[in-house]
Structures are given as structure tokens and as C-alpha cells.
Image: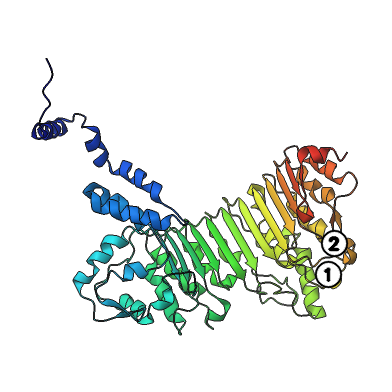
């Protein structure tokens, strides 16, 4: 006897009864009621390429089609914004006239409802003040009075972005005044923020150093931040507020201004302030510091200054004159700058070198090679520092601007690669990759490459100048 098909009303009653009793619901009900599953499905519509507009249209249609789709579809649609323009357009007092946003009337409490509904979904935001012919909506179309009005709005939510995780902020052409640019940055800071990328063009750097002001605000409003990428001139002495960022794991500083000499008596050691102001950042796992190009070599130093520079490098081989700094979790250290800076930094990091996995050393030797290292064996000093890197996996040494030519390399700037790294092999490190940039005065003739493979049993790749890469088997063939 054929079974009678149940009516729709009967099915609804069955589903309702099953929910009350905790029974399994039909597949459609289970999918539409599972927010995590819907979020996973709509996450497939994320795109950074040309498909972004197509996917955006699909997400809008999905949000309008089914109530269960609204939140997960809008979450993906608003997750990443390349400009705050779309958010500002949600505010009734803001009007667009002649392709410029302006404030038409004062804010009232109800003006923020739509803004909050969408702003809570934004996870990644770029506030970009650089004009671009390829950007459909450029930040320069937003009048400065818009930022000022939002900053002063009596009813605006605080923080403005309750779910923001990543912020990229550039202010090169926002307004004519410089301090309001920084105030605009503070507008976007919030407790959930984890990643901050900041870029100020050199011509926009004000006379007053706002680095400390910015970092103090970040520490107060986004205390759990983990990564800071700072692409603006900065002095080490302005980094003291970093000590309050207990969760900071990655710090990129580019460029660092010329290191300051501390004021000491003539009979005392001339100390360069290098990493002192970061010494309390105990959570750091990756540190990149790019010093200002040619900060030390553009001008011809006086004999007295050369004497002080050479003294710095000589004393950097002795811990008696150095304020030692230990970052217990640091595994990646990348630095680019004058060898004076490099040797001082390695000397201060002596207690940390044993835990490093990656060490990138990019050195600006400059043009005055003979005068700079006259009477000083630079590579011997560097080899002594490398010898304690017992957990090192990746090592890079190069001069990115190729100023050291083999013809001008004296004994103090000439070394065999195997001899340079031989002290490191005694620490039984698991070195897997070595990259050497030309020319640097580093040679690898004779059995140097074979000896290098013999020193490091786990060395798998050797990258030499001009793009030559040797595998382990090729290195062993150089017997």
C-alpha cells in the first residue's frame, strides 16, 4: 500500500516537534540554521583579483535572497575595504557633491545605526591618502572636514570599528596640516586591532617627532596588537611606548634614522643607542630594522669620527662595553644598514643569537672602504658573533648596493666563506640555507664550498652572487 505524502503543514509540525525534543532536523533546516557552516560556504567568495566585483554581486544577491544568508554574506562582503568611503556613505549627514564628500548637517543619535550595522563586519581596512589613477574611489575625494566632523561627533560609537583586525594607514595627501592626519589614525584604533601598517612620506614628517605620540595611542587603544609595520622615519629614542605592547610579536621599522651617539665623557665608551628602547618587548618573534640609507657614509667623516666608529666595532666584540638585550622568543632578525650599526646590534643581541632561526645581514659599506676599516678585520669580528647562533637555519649576507668591489677589498674585507662560517659549525647548528650577495670580498675558491657542506650536514642550498644556486650534491662534488 503506497505511503501518503505528508502535507507541508504536517512537515512543519514534525520539524517543530523534533526541535523541541532535540531530534535531528531535515538537511535544509540543518544547513540554514548552522551559522558556522554558512560562514564557511560564503568564505569561498573571497577574492583579491578581478573576480572581486563578480563575487561582490553574488554576495549582495545572496543577502537579499534568504534571511539566513544575510549575515554570513554581508560579513564576507564587508570584511575587507580598500577605503572608508563606503562606510562614510552610510552616514546621513554626509553628502557627495562634485565627487567630494562633505558634511551637510550636524550628527544626531540615529545617524549611526546603519554605519554600526555594517562597520561591525569590517576586519581589514586601508585608509590610503595616495592618489591613484587606478582607484575608482580615492581618499582625496573625502573632504578633511568629514574626518574632523566624525572625530568630534558627540554620538559616534567608541571605538568606531568594533571588529577591525588589520589597518593600513597612509597619509601623504590627506590634508594640509600634519597633526590632523595623525588624529585621523586614532579614529580607527580599537581593542581588537592586531596588525597595523603605517606609512608617512618623508616630506610629510612634521618637525615634531610624533612616533612616541602614535605608539602611546596604539598602546592605549589597541593593547593586544601583534604586528606593526612602520614605513616612516623614526628614531630609536621614540620607541619607548613599545614596552607597553606586551603581545607585540612582529616589528618592522623602515627607515630608522641615523643612530644617535650617547653623550659620554671623553674617557668613557661612546655608546650608540640601538636596541635599548625595545629591550622590554619580550614577546618579539620577528624584528626587521632598515636604517636610513647612507646615514653614516654620505659625508666624509672627520678623523675623530672615524676613530669613534672604529672603536665601536672593536668594542662590539666585547660584552664589557655593551648593554646586552635578550628577546626570549626572537627567531627572525633582519637588518640593513652600516656595518657600525650591524656590529653594535649583534653585540647587544648576544644573549638572543642562540635562539635565532633566520638572520639577514644587509650591509651598506659605502664608498670609503679603505678608510673605514683600516686596521680592522671586520669579518673576524662578524664570525665571532655568528659562532653562537646554535639554532640558525637560514643565513643571508649581502651588500644590497654593491659598493664593495673586489679590486678595493683589502685584507680586512676579504674572507673565505668556509672560514667565515667554520666557527658556526662548532655549535652544531641545523643550517639549511646560505645566501651570499656579491661582491663583499667573500670568496669560495678551492675546496671552500665542499668544506662548507662538510661543516653543515643539513645544508641543502647555497645561493651565490648572480643568481647561482647550488644543491647539496653539487656542493659535495666540489671536493
Decide: few, some or many residues near mark 1? Use Cα within 10 Å; few <14, some 14-19, many ≥20.
some
The residue pinned by badge 1 equals 369
Tell me the residue at 36%/79% (across/down).
Answer: 100
Q: Is residue 321 visible?
A: no
- Residue furthest front as drawn: 2
* Residue 369, placed above or below residue 458: below
Q: CA distance from mark 2 to mark 1?
A: 9 Å
Q: Nearer the viewer, residue 362 or 126?
A: 126
In this rendered view, identify the residue nearer to me: 373 or 467. 467
Residue 178 image label: none
Measuring from the top left, give residue 341's x and y in whole percent.
Answer: 70, 66
- Image quadrant in which the N terminus is located: top left
Residue 376 placed where, x, y %? 85, 64
Q: Residue at x 22, y 37 (%)?
A: 29
SS category of the residue bearing label 1: helix
Q: How many marks?
A: 2
Element under label 2?
helix
| Circle 2 residue | 413
State which quadrant residue 141 falls in: bottom left
- Quarter of the C terminus within the rendering: top right
Q: Residue 187: x and y, percent?
A: 37, 71
Q: Residue 2 location in percent, x, y?
A: 13, 18
Amino acid at each position: 500500500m503506497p505511503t501518503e505524502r505528508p502535507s507541508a503543514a504536517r512537515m512543519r509540525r514534525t520539524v517543530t516537534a523534533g526541535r523541541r525534543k532535540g531530534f535531528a532536523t531535515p538537511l535544509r533546516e540543518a544547513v540554514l540554521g548552522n551559522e558556522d557552516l554558512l560562514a564557511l560556504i560564503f568564505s569561498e567568495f573571497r577574492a583579491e583579483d578581478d573576480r572581486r566585483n563578480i563575487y561582490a554581486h553574488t554576495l549582495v544577491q545572496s543577502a537579499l535572497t534568504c534571511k539566513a544568508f544575510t549575515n554570513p554574506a554581508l560579513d564576507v562582503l564587508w570584511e575587507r575595504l580598500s577605503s572608508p568611503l563606503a562606510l562614510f556613505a552610510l552616514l546621513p549627514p554626509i553628502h557627495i557633491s562634485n565627487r567630494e564628500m562633505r558634511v551637510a548637517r550636524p550628527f544626531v543619535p540615529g545617524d549611526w545605526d546603519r554605519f554600526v550595522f555594517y562597520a561591525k563586519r569590517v576586519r581589514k581596512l586601508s585608509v590610503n591618502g595616495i592618489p591613484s589613477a587606478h582607484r575608482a574611489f580615492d581618499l582625496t575625494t573625502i573632504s578633511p572636514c568629514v574626518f574632523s566632523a566624525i572625530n568630534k561627533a558627540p554620538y559616534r560609537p567608541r571605538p568606531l570599528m568594533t571588529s577591525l583586525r588589520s589597518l593600513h594607514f597612509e597619509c601623504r595627501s590627506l590634508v594640509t596640516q600634519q597633526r590632523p592626519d595623525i588624529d585621523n589614525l586614532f579614529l580607527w584604533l580599537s581593542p581588537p586591532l592586531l596588525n597595523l601598517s603605517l606609512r608617512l612620506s618623508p616630506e610629510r614628517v612634521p618637525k615634531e617627532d610624533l612616533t612616541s605620540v602614535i605608539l602611546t595611542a596604539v598602546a592605549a587603544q589597541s593593547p593586544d596588537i601583534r604586528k606593526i609595520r612602520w614605513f616612516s622615519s623614526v628614531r630609536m629614542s621614540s620607541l619607548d611606548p613599545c614596552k607597553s605592547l606586551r603581545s607585540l610579536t612582529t616589528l618592522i621599522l623602515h627607515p630608522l634614522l641615523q643612530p644617535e651617539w650617547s653623550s659620554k665623557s671623553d674617557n668613557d665608551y661612546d655608546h650608540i643607542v640601538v636596541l635599548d628602547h625595545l629591550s622590554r618587548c619580550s614577546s618579539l618573534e620577528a624584528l626587521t630594522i632598515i636604517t636610513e640609507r647612507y646615514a653614516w657614509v654620505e659625508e666624509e667623516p672627520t678623523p675623530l669620527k672615524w676613530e669613534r666608529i672604529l672603536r665601536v666595532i672593536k668594542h662590539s666584540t666585547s660584552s664589557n662595553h655593551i648593554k646586552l638585550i635578550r628577546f626570549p622568543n626572537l627567531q627572525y632578525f633582519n637588518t640593513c644598514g652600516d656595518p657600525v650599526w650591524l656590529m653594535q646590534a649583534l653585540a647587544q643581541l648576544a644573549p638572543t643569537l642562540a635562539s635565532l632561526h633566520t638572520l639577514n645581514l644587509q650591509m651598506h659599506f659605502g664608498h670609503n672602504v679603505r678608510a673605514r676599516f683600516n686596521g680592522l678585520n671586520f669579518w673576524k669580528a662578524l664570525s665571532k658573533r655568528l659562532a653562537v647562533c646554535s639554532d640558525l637555519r637560514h643565513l643571508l649576507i649581502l651588500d644590497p648596493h654593491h659598493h664593495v668591489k673586489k679590486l678595493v677589498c683589502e685584507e680586512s674585507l676579504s674572507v673565505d666563506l668556509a672560514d667565515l662560517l667554520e666557527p658556526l659549525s662548532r655549535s652544531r647548528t641545523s643550517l639549511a640555507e646560505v645566501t651570499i650577495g656579491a661582491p663583499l670580498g667573500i670568496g669560495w675558491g678551492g675546496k671552500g664550498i665542499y668544506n662548507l657542506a662538510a661543516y653543515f650536514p643539513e645544508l641543502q642550498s647555497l645561493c651565490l652572487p648572480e643568481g647561482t644556486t647550488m644543491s647539496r650534491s653539487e656542493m659535495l662534488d666540489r671536493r
